[in-house]
Image: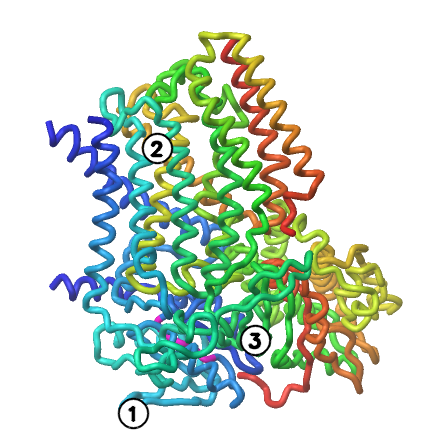
Amino acid sequence: MIWTELAAPLLVILCTLLVGSYLLEYIHGKAGTWLAGGGSYGFLMVFHRVTFKLHQQRISTEHPDSLNRLLAPALLLGLAAMGLSVVPWSRNFVPADIATGIVLWGAVEVLATVVIFLYGWSANAHFPLLAGYRYVSLGLSYMLVSMFVLIGVALPAESLRISAVVESQREVWNIIRQPLGLPLFLIVGLGLTFWGPLNFASPKELASGVSSDTSGPAYVMWELARRSMLVAFAFIAASAFLGGWLGPVLPGPVWLILKTTAVLTVLLVVGRLLPKISPDGFLTLAWVILLPLAFVDLIWAGVLALW
Amino acid sequence: MAVGLAQAMAKRAPVAVFAAVGRDSDALFAQLLLVPEVELVTSPRQASILLVVGNIPRTFVEQLETVHDQLPHPRGTVWWHATPLFSFRDQALEAVATTAQQAALGQLLREIQARLLSGTRESEPDLKSDVPPAPWPGKGDHGQGGEGMMGGMPYGRPMAMMGPDLRDGLQLDEWSFSVGPFYHALPPGLVAHVTLQGDVIQQWKIHSKPYPRSLRSVFMEALVAPVAIAELEAARAHDHLLLLARMLQLEELESLGYRALALAAQLISPSTYEEAIKSGAVLFRLLRVNGFLFLGGGIGRISARQAMDFGGFVARALGASEDFRNGNDAYRKLGFAPVCQQAGDLQARRIQLVAEIEQSLMLMRKARQSGSLFTADRIETLYGPLTADQMPLDKSDLLESLLAGHEWGDAVAVIGSLPIVAVVEQKESAA
Amino acid sequence: MDLVVLLVTPLFTSLLALAILLLSGRRNPGSSWPQRQPFLGGGSPDTHAWNRFHVRYYPMALLLIAFEMEMMFMYPWAAVYVAEGIKAMAEMGMFLGILSTGILYAWREGVFKWQ
């Protein structure tokens, strides 16, 4: 019983995060070279870069908060694993099928904000701290959009359980029923992992922000944690909006992986294409445009559920 | 064996390089971004090789040593078109000769990285002495006593003291530091002392102006004798594209920045002008679509007086439609009409820059077919008007008043959009 | 059992990551003082980084807390919404409307600017 209910799901989650992060980086590199019209990105390039970084020395800064510096990447990875554990892979295989899966995902997002800020804070260096400070404003803003959109998804399912949300999409996927939901949720995903246009915590203008004083294995671990969070997010997005493991011919997990890959590809191409928004601009955008759109989405979902 | 395999894998990674840019090297730096084996990183912590591009003035030796020591082991230094400022005993000094091209540079970097990984090349030791920057020497025997609230400096450096905030006079801690000559987001050579409250700049004092640049010879030739308009416009587009690539990279648009640089590289020799026009079309279509030209409104607005100092596309972004090519017969036949924007802020400058590059490419294409020539006593360049007795001057003092009150990211974007460096005569021809 | 999995998964993953970080740091040469200096493009800092700067977006955080409390009510509301019907929609609509005036007010007051 321990094997089927504890160890096997744990193994599945870890492998998914590792393989998912690798694939994500590969798709990111490929999207970059496609958009740049030049350069090349082989499949093993990620592996080469990672093994190289693992050979470098891990530098620390003057008087950092060493406990948090070590804990932050580990905790971010743990949060990603926790977020992924509520995703159903098939009718029978859900690592942790709790009745409040959506609430858990909200908690994961909030705690991720805390952890990312702590990482910038713990370095006791100027650029990381600036980047962490800017990230918190982003983190507080996208939280609400994400929660309203997920509650909208929970309405037809009459439950907060993610497997119930997937079951409620048997006739029609939520991306068709609630068209505003997935685009808003994708923006949240970009913000959660400070990717692309919402890269407040690791931007070029701050010499890679929270990572500007990280080197070697610590850098690999941080970037792995960040990408794992994006992978877990993509799984949740696929389950909540694209029908999760539902699909005609292929087995459930295969459908889930295909849908997640589609979500990731869209996110990564958009991340490469759109320019960075300034914190000021994003604050206004999130509260004045995105949040009312989330309200509209919720009202739409409510009306449709009672129809 | 596993170690050997891991090392073999690691040797095939692209070389993570931190570029310390010196004088007369913007053309080199633009080439560097196109070298496939090189991965330019923004922080020396993620690099393994410090690449010094162009000569570094003696005044910045200490800063270069600081950056060098910030690289993690195993590390090495390569001097490209630069005289070496430090060397280590028992080590081959990697000074790359002036005739080295990109491919040779890529190979050399790969080789050095491989040797560093396998241990055949020693990692370079620290250049500065291993003492804490501000030790905590309280007065007593056990470190107690001394001045300040803590009786010393417990976190390695002095504590930040309070200061008024520009926005509402609130007195909270303000932190200050000097941003050095090797910061990639600023023009190379610019040293500024910045005071921040949170991430809003309170004060920006220039300690050292950025290195002056030199223009391509076709601009100087146009002052004395007729030159082919195609060549002149290609050179203008090239300079503008380097600025655009810079701006795109600051906006996290690395792929589009790469496109802009590849396009600029195609504009160097006439044989690739045709491909340049085609790739230019793709780049501009992407820029229209992705919203780059919609951002930046209201930031970095300069006054009319300051815009006059700048000249060039900056002045035209404020509505001063003076363009020295206007009124010239050859240009009129090619269908030239000056473009200008009204707002004079960051967004207007971006729109103007993209519009002028497109215009230059269009003029270049038409001029190739018609073979028109042009000469005048005032030439339009990226940095402003060029005349026989006056080269564009350095305008970085403007930043002190312009940047106060801006958020850090906005301030960096504003600096990226203003061509503030001075122009000097080219001393010797670059290889 | 679900809760056990939920607890063990992040704990195990974090501990694994922590172990990897600590083990990889063991054959690390320690960082020397010149290596530890914060990266500022070659420049030097006058002060250490930790200081008391004003978190300018705290009014936005207050607004966020108001909406978070609404979200707390919406979680169970979402589960029983279809069963309760129009009444539930009306109630939540009123709640949302009242809080939205908060957003309008905050926008007018300039809370969403970076000042």
Residue C114 is left or right of residue A203, and the answer is: right
Badge nearest the viewer, 2 or 1: 1
Question: Same chain, marks 1 and 3?
Answer: yes
Amino acid type assigned to the residue bearing label 2 in the image: Leu
Q: Which mark is residue A301?
A: none
Q: Which residues are magenta?
A: B48-52
Quadrant that contains the N terminus of chain A: top left
Residue C36 x, y percent position in the rendering: 37, 72
Q: Residue visible at 39% across and 59% down? A: A122
Magenta-drawn stretch contains C36: no
Residue for badge 1: B89
Q: Which mark is residue A258?
A: 2
Q: Based on the displayed image, in which of its 4 quarters is residue A286 positioned?
A: top right
Q: Residue visible at 80% across and 74% down? A: B374
Magenta: main secondary structure: strand
Q: Tell me the element at label 3.
A: loop
Question: Same chain, marks 2 and 1?
Answer: no
Question: Same chain, marks 3 and 2?
Answer: no
Residue C6 is left or right of residue B180, and the answer is: left
Residue A19 x, y percent position in the rendering: 27, 44
In which chain is the residue bearing label 3?
A: B
Q: Residue visible at 47% across and 48% down? A: A195
Residue B104 x, y percent position in the rendering: 40, 77
